[in-house]
Image (tube, grey):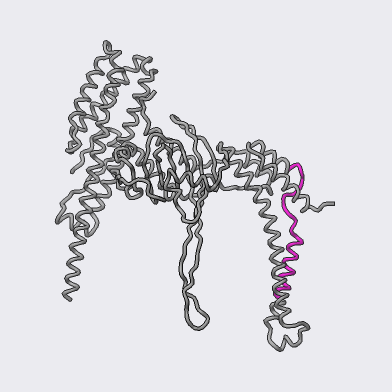
Amino acid sequence: MELFLGLAIILSIVSIIIIYNGIIRRFNSVEEAWSNVISLERQKNKILPELEKLVNQYQDYESGVMTQITELRSALDKLSSNKVDTKSLETAHTKSAQMMKGINALVENYPELKASESYTQLMREITEQNENIGAGLRIFNGNAKDFNDGIQVFPNSLVNGLLNKKEKIAPFSDSEAESGFEYKPNF
Amino acid sequence: MASHNEKLKNLLVEVSNQVELAHSEDELLSCIDTLEASNLEIKFENKNSIIYAIVFATLGLISLFFYSSGYYVRSYLPFNHDTYLLAAIASGVAALIALAIIQFRKNQINAISNLIFTKDIYADNELSPIKVNAKSYARELGESFGEFHRGNHSREIRSLVEGKHTGEEHTFTYRYYQFHYVNKVTYYETTSDGNGGTRRVRRTRYDHYDRYGMLIDFQLAKSLEIVKSRGKKMYDERYKVASNNFNKQFKVYCNDPMDAARFLKPVIVLELESLASALRTLNLEFSDSGQLCVSFHDSNVLKSNRQFGINQLAEFKQEISGFTDLPKLKLLTESLHKLFKYSDNNFKD
C-alpha cells in the first residue's frame, strides 16, 4: 500500500514537472515567434539606404519622403527584440505605411522612377519583407494556439493555475494584420 | 487468310514499335491514326479461349469429384483412382492457361495504352527521360545526399526524367527520379524438427522499397538537411525554427546554424509545412556543392488517371489531344520556385 502511495506521489510530481516545463516551452516558443516578427520588421533598415539613394535624385521636389524615411529609421531603432514593446512596433509600422504612401505618390509624379530597375528591386524586397512578416505572424498565431491549448486542457489548467500562472494569449486576427499592428499581445 | 487475332497481334507489334519511337503528341496521335486506319476492332476474339477455359474447368471439377468420391462410386469407375487426380490437375492447368491467354491479350492492349498515355504526359509537361547507369548513378548521388544510403542490399535509380520549370522570377531544370532500394533482413524462425521438437532456422528476406524525388541546382543554400526521416547523417548541428508545427514535422541539421537561419525565413517555413502535407515523408537535402535533393514517398507525381484506351480509339484520341495536368508536379515545382524567390538577393544585377 505504502509502495503504491509512494509511486503515485512520484508519478504525480513527475507529471507536474513535465506539464510545467511544457507550458514554459510553449510560452517561450510564442515569445520567440514574436521576437522573429520584430526582427523581420527591423530588417526594413536594410532597404532604407537604397530608398534614400533613389529618392535623393528627386530631393529638390520631394523632401517629404526623406523625412518619412528618417522617421521610420528612428522608429526602427527604438525596437528591441529583448523586450516586448508593442507600442514601438505599432509606431514603426505606422511610419513604414506613411513612407510607402509617400513613395507611391512620388512614383505617380515621376513615371521614369517607376520604370527604373532600382525601384522594381526595392519594391520586390519590400513585398518579400511584408510577406515574411505576414508568415511570421501566422507562425506566432500557431504557437499561441499551441500555448493556449496547453494551459486550458486538464490537468494542465490546474498546474498553470497553481504554478505557471500564465494567461491566454490572444491570436492575431487577419483583419488586424491587414490594417497594421493594432494587435497588442498580452504577455 | 489471317484471323482477326493474328491481324490484331501484328498491328499491335507495329504500333508498339511506332510508340517507342514517338516523342511528340503529334507522333503519338499518328500511332492512334495507324490503329484507326487498320479498321480492326482493337479487341481480341476470346470466344475459343473462354470455351476451352470452361470445358477444362468442368473436366477438372468432374475429375476432382471422382477422385474424392468414396469406395462404392470408385468401384464403378473405369480408371485407376490416381488417374482422376492427374486429370484434375491437367484440366486445371489447361483452364488456367486459357484464362492467362485472355489476360495476356488484355494486358497487351493496356500496355500500349499506358505507353501512349505516359509519353503524352511527358510531351504535355515537357519532360524527357534520361538513360543512366542505375547503380552507379545511385552511388554517385550517395556521395552528396544521405537519401541514397537507404537499403543495405542494393540501390538503383530506376527512372530519371528531366524537366524545366519557368516561374515568374526564376527558371530551373530538374531531374525527377525513382530510387529503388532493397533491405536484406536475416531472421530466425522456430519450426518443427519432425521428431516432435523444434529447431531454429535462419532465413533471409529482401524488402523492396521505392522513393521518389527531384534534383536541382540550388546555390542559395548549402550543407543543410530538412528531413522527416533521413537516410544517413550528413550534418551534425541541430537547428530549430520558431514554428512549433514545423519542428514537429521536420528536423533540421546543418553545418552552420546561421546558414540555416538565413535560409529558413518564415515564408519558406510555411511553404515547407504546406508541401509536407501534400507529399509523404518529405526530405530536403542541400549538398555542400549547391545541389538540392527533394525526396518523398509519393509515387504519383508524374502519374495521372487514364480514362480511355486504344480499345476506345475516338475517346482515347481526344484524351491524348488534350493537356494532361500533373497537379503534384505543379505544386512541387511552384514550391521550389518559392525557395528560389525568397532566398535570392533582390538587389543582385
User: Residue B209: where, in percent of width, then height?
Assistant: 49, 55
User: Residue A138: where, in percent of width, then height?
Assistant: 31, 41
Quadrant into which the C terminus of chain A falls: top left
Q: Nearer the viewer, residue B71 or B220?
A: B220
User: Residue A123: where, in percent of width, then height?
Assistant: 35, 25
Q: Is the residue B172 above or below the residue A56 in the image? A: below
In this rendering, position of residue B117 left or right of residue B286: right
In this rendering, position of residue B318 left or right of residue A62: right
Q: Nearer the viewer, residue B37 or A39?
A: A39
Residue furthest right as drawn:
B1
In this rendering, position of residue B160 left or right of residue B221: right
Q: Nearer the viewer, residue A137 or B27?
A: B27
Magenta stretch containing residue B49, yes or no? yes
Magenta span main SS? helix
Q: Nearer the viewer, residue A146 or B231?
A: B231
Residue furthest top as drawn:
A60
Give the residues in magenta: B36-61
Quadrant into which the N terminus of chain A falls: bottom left
Locate residue A57: give its quadrant.
Answer: top left
Locate residue A45: give its quadrant.
Answer: top left
Q: Is the residue A184 above or below the residue A161 in the image? A: above
The residue at 49%/56% (across/down) is B153
In this rendering, position of residue A27 left or right of residue B282: left
Query: Looking at the image, how many numbered discs can be counted on the residues?
Result: 0
User: Residue B201: where, in percent of width, then height?
Assistant: 49, 72
The residue at 21%/52% (across/down) is A23
The residue at 17%/36% (across/down) is A85
